[in-house]
Image (spheres, rainbow, N blue to C red):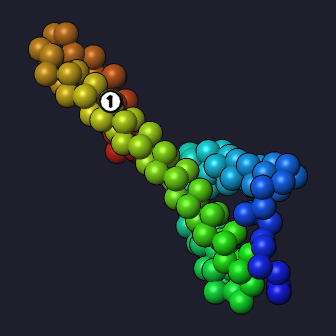
Amino acid sequence: QDSSEYPLSLNTRPWRRFRAGFCELLMAVVQQCQYSVIYDEFLMGSLISFLISLSDSQVRAFRHTSTLAAMKLMSALVKVALGVSVHQENTLRQYEAERSKGRGRRATEKLEALMVKRQEV
């Protein structure tokens, strides 16, 4: 607590590995949860509350760690949001292409599946 140095800012080999592993862990959690758990608000709400608590700490190392974790968490969430956006655009484009076909060439099953997929995304 009284130290002016904190682990994530140290440039020694073990702390560089720890920092890289810590960042990778946060990115992996979001990546693994991108299709289900991050949308239920429990995980993200709890994690955000935890990071806010750490950022209010008297201990500088905790504040620094929570800032780094929040930045990595937000970066991972932005990547997930970008992927969802691309997926949504592709689905919409496929739906519009299928809908614009003539009645004889239109696959109604595919159109219905794309509509369900579009609403899900």
Q: Is residue 82 visible?
A: yes
Q: Position of residue 6 (x, y in %)?
A: 78, 71
Q: Amino acid at mark 1?
A: Asn
Which quarter of the picture shows residue 50? bottom right
At x 78%, y 61%, the residue is: 10
At x 13%, y 22%, the residue is: 100
Q: Is residue 37 left or right of residue 1?
A: left
Which quarter of the picture shows residue 43? bottom right
Residue 19 against residue 58 in the figure, above or below: above
Q: Position of residue 9 (x, y in %)?
A: 73, 63
Which quarter of the picture shows residue 114? top left
Q: Is residue 15 left or right of residue 26?
A: right
Residue 86 against residue 107 in the figure, above or below: below
Number of numbered discs: 1
Considering the image in quadrants, where does the C terminus appear?
top left
Q: Give the camera-side residue of 71 and 120.
A: 71
Q: Give the camera-side residue of 85 and 25.
A: 25
Q: Identify the secondary structure beneath mark 1.
A: helix
Q: Is residue 18 visible?
A: no
At x 15%, y 16%, the residue is: 101
Q: Is residue 64 left or right of residue 93?
A: right
Residue 70 against residue 34 in the figure, above or below: below
Q: What residue is disc 1 on?
A: 90
Q: Give the camera-side residue of 82 and 105.
A: 82
Q: Position of residue 4 (x, y in %)?
A: 77, 79
Q: Give the camera-side residue of 78 and 85.
A: 78
* Residue that protrudes farthest toward the right in the picture: 14
* Residue that protrudes farthest toward the bottom in the picture: 58
At x 67%, y 77%, the residue is: 63
